[in-house]
Image (cartoon, grey):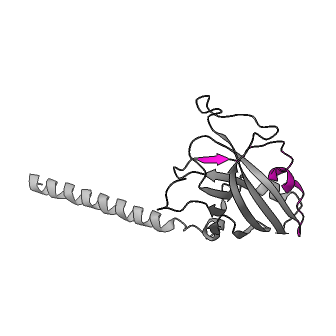
Amino acid sequence: MRTVANNTTTYRGRRWAGVLGALVTAVVAWAAVPLPQAGADDAAPIGNLGDTLHVNYDGIVADVTVHDVLPTDVPPGWTWAGSPRWRAQGSPWKANVTVHTIKSVNPYQLATAFTFAGVTPYADAYQSRHTEAPNALETKLLNTPPGSTVDGDVYWDVYRGLVTNVVLINPATGTHLAQWNIWHPGDPLP
């Protein structure tokens, strides 16, 4: 015949066995999760405005330079976008960029693999805008065989904070390929 004390002891033993089983399962599950592999984000070069950064990503090798980031007149083909609250509150800005293609699978690969975002110190990221400007970089990247160099402009609709970093990303994967710093923490904001 069991006593009340034995039932309590048996219940505590089962509870501890359940906790121990859950702990072992959690440790095994944690150990089974693969660690992230080194990729383009780990090796993405970071420099200052005017620096030439070497980009090596998915069969593409290129030297890329962002020369400046300046306000500009409205380029041909520009349309205002975004929330009506912010529409036309800012102005178009452009970055002058040089891309020297060293290696690519085909002449238009850079056009599909590269885009530039203008990032503010408040983590707003302005995506590049499509325009009909004759010097638009997105158009020039459509024909960049290995050995070619193109200069062009990337346009953003800057309506909140000013751009303090230019980030080269792959639009399909969001992979960070390179970054140019305009502003450094500790300096006064632009």
Query: Where does residue 167 sit, x and y in percent of width and height?
Result: 65, 58
Residue 144: in magenta span? yes
Q: Quadrant for residue 148, please give it.
A: bottom right
Identify the image quadrant of the N terminus.
bottom left
Q: Quadrant for residue 12, please give it.
A: bottom left
- Residue 104 visible in the picture: yes
Q: Is residue 117 above or below residue 38?
A: above
Query: Where does residue 174 sit, x and y in percent of width and height?
Result: 66, 54
Residue found at x 61% / y 31% = 83
Residue found at x 76% / y 59% = 97
Residue 143: in magenta span? yes
Q: Quadrant for residue 36, please give it.
A: bottom right
* Front residue of 63 and 20: 63
Magenta residue span: 125-148
Apparent side of residue 92 relative to residue 181 in the rendered image (left or right): right
Residue found at x 25% / y 60% = 16
* Front residue of 142 and 119: 119
Q: How many marks?
A: 0
Residue found at x 81% / y 59% = 110
Q: Is residue 158 above or below residue 108?
A: above
Query: Where does residue 77 sit, x and y in percent of width and height?
Result: 81, 37
Apparent side of residue 133 relative to residue 14 in the rendered image (left or right): right
